[in-house]
Image: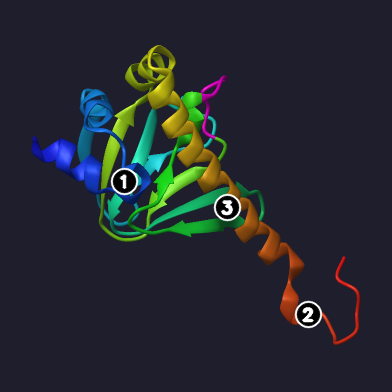
Amino acid sequence: MEVLEQLLANHPFLLGLKAKHLNLLAGCAARQEYGRGDFLFREGTEADQMFLLHSGRVTLEIHQPGIGEIQLESLLPGDVLGWSCLFPPYRWHVDARALEPAVVLILAGDCLRPKLDADPELGYAVTKRLLNKVHERLEHVRMQRLDLYNVRPGERIP
């Protein structure tokens, strides 16, 4: 197995994926390094890649006029980001910036989409994993929105 395929096989997002599917994904993959402060992508630009974070930390953030950058989430090794490359209109909705030096495995969207469509088993496996990540992030946001520390005993949570 090639080094890139090994990195893909060992990434938590792809654990348990069949070897034939890892081989297909490897054909779309590249390893990329980012320095502290480097942007992986910017809001509003073309979403053309999916990123599997191998090492380092990446923040998802938005720019609010008059305030500046607002961090939405900090991602750690094993996380996946950039699934906007799979869904029209293929545009980023947030910025992604390295908080520290980071190594990512990049899956090119224009290569990945046809492979997911052509192989329903692979498409299902990736979609199922993505939905799990979406669910985790929504739960995380829900907990943030509850603001549990500001609720007094006996007070109803909105």
Please indicate, yes or no, whether residue 100 appears anywhere in the rendered image. yes
Residue 143 percent location from the top left of the image: 68, 65
Amino acid at circle 1:
Leu
The percent coordinates of residue 7 (x first, y second) are 19, 44
Q: Amino acid at mark 3?
A: Arg
Q: Residues within 10 Å of mark 1 (few under 14, many from 20)?
A: few
On screen, residue 154 versus residue 17, left or right, reads right
Q: Which residue is mark 3?
A: 137
Q: Is residue 67 visible?
A: no
The answer to if 89 sits in the magenta stretch is yes
User: Image quadrant for the C terminus?
Assistant: bottom right
> What residue span does the magenta drawing correspond to?
87-92
Residue 127, position as x, y percentages in the image: 49, 32
Left or right: 134, with 36 as reference point: right
Q: Tell me the residue that label 2 is attached to.
A: 150
Q: Which numbered disc, 2 or 3, marks the residue that appears first in the sequence?
A: 3
Counting residues from the N terminus, which is met first, the one under dot 2 or under dot 1?
Answer: 1
Q: By what rule are the colours in the image chosen?
A: rainbow
Does dot 1 land on a helix, a strand or a loop? loop
**Which label lies toward us, 2 or 3?**
3
- Determine whether label 1 and label 3 are within 8 Å by CB: no
Label 2 neighbour load within 10 Å: few <14, some 14-19, many 20+: few
| Badge 2 amino acid | Asn
Q: Is residue 42 one of those drawn in magenta?
A: no
Residues under labels 1 and 3: Cα distance?
19 Å
Residue behind mark 1? 15
Alpha carbon separation for disc pair 2 and 3 = 22 Å
Nearest to the observer: residue 52 or residue 93: 52
